[in-house]
Amino acid sequence: MSQIVEEIRALKEQKDAVILAHYYVNDEVQELADYIGDSYYLAKLATEVTQKTIVFCGVSFMGESAKILNPEKTVLMPDAAADCPMAHMADVDKIKKVKEEYEDVAVVCYVNSTAELKAHSDVCVTSSNALKIVRALPNKRIYFIPDENLGRYIASKVPEKEFIFNDGFCHVHTSISLENVKKAKEAKPEAKVLVHPECKLEILKEADYIGSTSGIIDYATASDAKEFIICTEMGVLYELQQKNPDKKFYSVGHRQYCPNMKKISPEKVRNVLMTGENEVVLEETMRVRAKEPLVRMLQLAR
């Protein structure tokens, strides 16, 4: 393993590259990354790094977002097949139909979406800034795509706006069941329950804290509690344990596991640095259109 890390280090120097990794990738990939974060942090960071090549250890929509915001940079994906099913779970024809039907509607697009969906949206959001951005929009109606669970959570916090929901979901978060959460709470009654808003509303009602991946990490780190039940993808345990070696973290008793995120390995990181394969390429008109809602997100989230 250490030999691969050394090779990656040398290749980074040679290629003027930086490695960004999402919290859900394997521990050994997070370990060799220059920066680790959630979607919002990494999208923002991609606009600030000085290196001319970005190796994005995550799924395809993340690499697309980095390329949309940085057309002059080379963005490489360690595994071209690492995709997010939810990113495709909205329909351009339905977006057009909703816009025709309601005049005062903002299409609010979760950043976990394809470049094409972003290109047909008014603003992008992440789980950490969605509430702030939706509140800041002048529109009375919100068409929230692609994730229904996050949309319903935001709607519960902004009763003054009318929401149109989309039939999309994250399979990892949706599969966390109320029965399993209750069993975990019975087994660990002292533990705080930390929940990602991509979970169903019935799970959110059991939470001591609801927030993005980075929000969950910050909450656990600041908390006086010593035990936590984590309702999100288990890749987050790496950072939680790094920051809190004296605390205990538990799953809710089933595989909170994203197979796409886990496709990324140190070997694949080294290989794309060597070969330049799996470069993210976007058609320019699409890129420009998809950039507007991302830039608007970064401005409104400030």
Image (tube, rainbow, N blue to C red):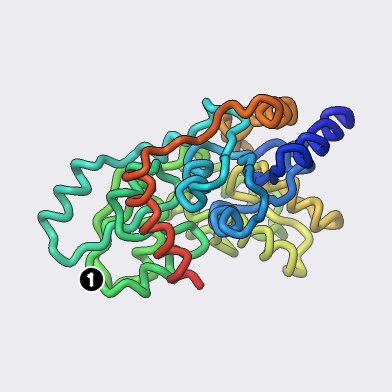
The amino acid sitting under disc 1 is Lys
> In the displayed structure, does residue 238 sit left or right of residue 251?
right
Residue at 14% x, 48% y is 97
Task: Please tell me in which quadrant of the rendered image residue 143 appears.
Answer: bottom left
Residue 178 seen from this side: no
Residue at 48% x, 53% y is 69
Binning the other alpha carbons within 10 Å of mark 1 as few (below 14), some (14 to 19) or many (20 upward) gives some
Q: How many marks?
A: 1
Residue at 41% x, 40% y is 87
Query: Nearest the camera: 100 or 148?
Result: 100
Q: Secondary structure at mark 1?
A: loop
Depicted 112 relative to depicted 156: above or below: above
> In the displayed structure, does residue 114 sit left or right of residue 52?
left
Figure quadrant of the N terminus: top right
Residue at 51% x, 51% y is 70
Task: Please tell me in which quadrant of the rendered image residue 267 appears.
Answer: top right
Q: Position of residue 208 (x, y in %)?
A: 59, 64
**Direction right: furthest residue:** 2
Q: Position of residue 128 (x, y in %)?
A: 52, 62
Depicted 77 relative to depicted 52: above or below: above
Query: Nearest the camera: 231 or 261?
Result: 261
Residue 191 seen from this side: yes
Q: Circle 1 sits on which residue?
A: 140
Q: Position of residue 184 (x, y in %)?
A: 64, 47
Q: Position of residue 188 (x, y in %)?
A: 71, 52
Task: Please tell me in which quadrant of the rendered image residue 278 appears.
Answer: top right
